[in-house]
Image (cartoon, rainbow, N blue to C red):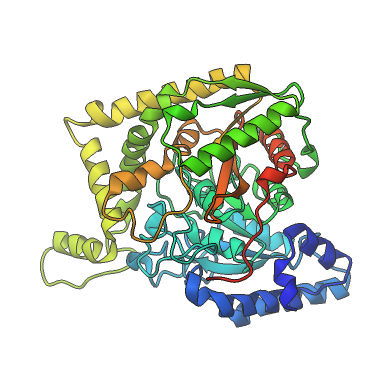
Amino acid sequence: MKELIYLTYSEIKNKLNDGSLSSEDLVTAYLQRINSVDSKLKAFLEINQEKILKQAKESDVRRKSGKLLSEFDGIPIGIKDNICITGEITSCSSKILENFVSPYDATVITKLKEKGFVLFPRLNMDEFAMGSSTENSAFQTSKNPFDSERIPGGSSGGSAAAVAASMLPVSLGSDTGGSIRQPASLCGIWGLKPTYGRVSRFGLIAYASSLDQIGPFSNDMQGIIDLMEILSGIDSKDQTTAKVEHFESKSVSDIDWKGKKIGIMKTEDFNFSPDVNVRYLEILKSLEAKGAQLVPLDFSLLKYAIPVYYLIATAECSSNLSRFDGIRYGLRKETSGKLDDLYSESRSAGFGKEVKRRILLGTFSLSSGYYDAYYGKAQKARVLIRKQYAEFFKSVDVILQPTSPTTAFKVGEKTKDPIQMYQADILTTSVNLAGVPAISCPAGVDQNGLPIGIQLTTSHFDESKLLGFAKSLSNIDLCKVSLPKEIK
């Protein structure tokens, strides 16, 4: 039973459907793995084994009676703690929502339930998805399965660590400025941020509404492809979902690199670690040998992505988090003073340091006298970044660049310097500002055995091409990563 946890998503799907594996046996193996290693990794905030096993047993009953809900019936999937599930605590890893039980399902959860997936809530995260290391969780710091002294990335660190540690084959996260792709890179797995509007955000507790997007992690490419088809689509509950042709998994096929134009960046313009830089150049050389044409792009606007992102994201977070006031739901600090005291004391006790920092920055940038100077200019710069990506894709088929400038850093290494932490997202935030899709793919390991990630980006709603390129990239030996069996 122990070997079941090391199966890929595709192997699990095939074995469940040919009857050689039961969902109960598979889920039992994963629960044993969680009990064995999660005390070191802290990926899960909570595990209700009885409820999880009940789902698996119900799937097996459907299988025996020939009434499967889909070909995915019985497959386990982890859920980040900011995606609402009826009857489950959804805390966003924050004390202000520590005991909040969701009264409804997020649209993506409804879709997973309709297909028969076995849900594994609640995966740890940076509080309200604000962070790049999962050190901002109010409850625990998640660790990297390749080295438990290092961070798994963030904000979806728990979702990435659970898959990388073979505690689950797939999971869901959310990506506001790189929060799926960066932890996928640091944990050696696949992680996709779909085009903004491709996947419903209904039931995703908001950080920055114009940037947030739900997406999948997987231990193989097929998991990303299948989940993309399941999760995407128009939703009447989310008016930002786009009316475009539905994504279908059959639209994805390996892409021949010959003749394809690949947009690349000048490595000397960015402070990549030596190992990341070397691997990036090696992959480019390999693709060039396969007939691809490398096209250098002008990423000069990228240097503005971090300040533009943090002005827009914090402004939206200031607005979105104003609903947590101690009145309607969440933490309420009793006070004998004025109503303003109730607000301030509840929010002071409920929000962590990083959330407070971003609320203050966002409130300042939206305030009278500063709106035009900061937020207004950031929005104009965002338009320029979006236009730049549109120009890129007139001349290239795909953009290929490192996902993160470094491999995973040690826990506590950057917590005292927020600016240094923010710079960890320099290669991912521009994608969210432009709203285009991007995926992080494994790209081998550095000299310390830590994973390196490569990010692929295509134009709006071109996920079929994006995942085709990613599938082809996964076949290159340079991009292979073996997930750790022993957690040190």
Q: Is residue 423 above or below residue 7?
A: above
Where residue 404 sits: x, y (%)?
Answer: 48, 43
Where residue 55 sits: x, y (%)?
Answer: 69, 74
Residue toward you, 297 or 21 = 297
Image quarter where the N terminus lies is bottom right
Determine whether, in the image, residue 208 is placed left or right of residue 183: left
Residue at the image position 62 percent from the left and 35 percent from the top: 282
The extreme bottom residue here reads 50
The extreme front residue here reads 447
Q: How many marks?
A: 0
Where residue 267 sits: x, y (%)?
Answer: 48, 30
Determine whether, in the image, residue 79 is placed left or right of residue 375: right
Where residue 54 sits: x, y (%)?
Answer: 68, 79
Residue at the image position 60 percent from the left and 40 percent from the top: 198
Determine whether, in the image, residue 78 is placed left or right of residue 203: right
Q: Is residue 260 visible?
A: yes
Q: Is residue 437 visible?
A: no
Residue at the image position 60 percent from the left and 28 percent from the top: 459
Quadrant of the rendered image containing residue 311: top left
Residue toward you, 474 or 444 = 444
Residue toward you, 345 or 411 = 411
Determine whether, in the image, residue 145 is placed left or right of residue 155: right
Q: Is residue 133 above or below residue 40?
A: above
Quadrant of the rendered image containing residue 59: bottom right
Residue at the image position 79 percent from the left and 38 percent from the top: 253
Q: Is residue 47 above or below residue 316?
A: below
Quadrant of the rendered image containing residue 128: bottom left
